Image (spheres, grey):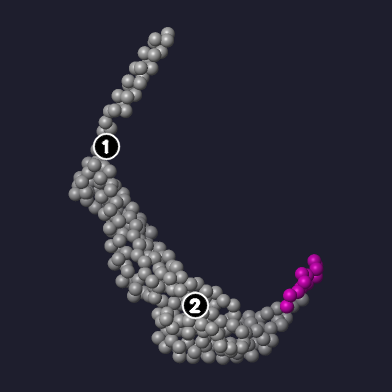
Amino acid sequence: MTVLKHLAAAVAATFALSAHAAPLESLPTSGALVVVPAFGEVRHVNDQATIVLSAEEVDKDKAAAASRVNQKMKQGLDIVKQEDPQASLKTQGYYTYPVYPEEPAPVNGQPRKPRVPTAWRVGQSLQVITTNLAGLPKTVAAAQRVLALNNLHFSLTPETTRKLDDQRIAATYANLNERVNSIAHAMGRKVGDAVIDTIDFEGSGNYLDRVSITGSRVTTAMASNVAAPVEEPSFEPGETTLQMRLVGKVRFK
């Protein structure tokens, strides 16, 4: 029995070695259709800033609150126009609503008394879009003497984005070529045997731009009523990364 066991083990080992040593046959690739995803991106320093300035007042007299907001907004507009004449300005978000005092919850079964406002809150915002990033700290500091800086973010101008589009397409197409070369090598085929059947930019109907922005994003509290000088803030525009995705279908002869 021992001899038979050793013989069986030797035969099994021989078969295993033979199977391991046998060369693998390549899969036939003639007429194969290969779907290849590709990616590309370009980066550029942000060259545009969008800031939102605002004025807000609270007063028992609704007209008085509105009057002070209107005055602040006019002063703020004049300041921004003087500091940055080329900036694009847009007033927006004018609101007026009552301010009610805190009241205890009503007792079950008792009707709630009519609420009477104790004051009125009035406000308005100003959107500023500018490419003068060098003068932006000075402009914001001057405007903050009257208005509050509510938000700031950096981006690319439409003109720069259009110019980068050629580079983004070229980078994505180059990545497709790199991947097709690698796939052809893995399949044991020549790149010349491959013919592009279809190229779907942005990947199978997904036509939304993928944009990543780095840089300053600022949100601040409301400005005080005192028009005191304001130190210039520090901003870092950062850069924007524009990405593109495509899906190519490549058929091998």
At x 46% / y 70%, what residue is drawn?
215
User: Magenta stretch: residue 107 in it?
Assistant: yes
**Separation of marks 2 and 1 at Cα, in angstroms:** 62 Å
- Predominant secondary structure, magenta span: loop
Classify residue 209 by image quadrant. Answer: bottom left
In the image: residue 238, left or right of residue 98: left
Mark 1 secondary-structure assignment: loop
At x 38% / y 71%, what residue is drawn?
45
The answer to which of 238 and 97 lies nearer the viewer is 238
Residue 155 point in image, percent of width and height = 42, 72
**Residue that badge 2 annotates:** 234
Q: Mark 2 packing: few (<14 Cα in 10 Å), some, or many (20+)? A: few
Mark 2 secondary-structure assignment: loop
Stretch in magenta: 101-112
Name the residue type under label 1: Leu
Residue 57 point in image, percent of width and height = 62, 85
The dot on residue 27 is 1
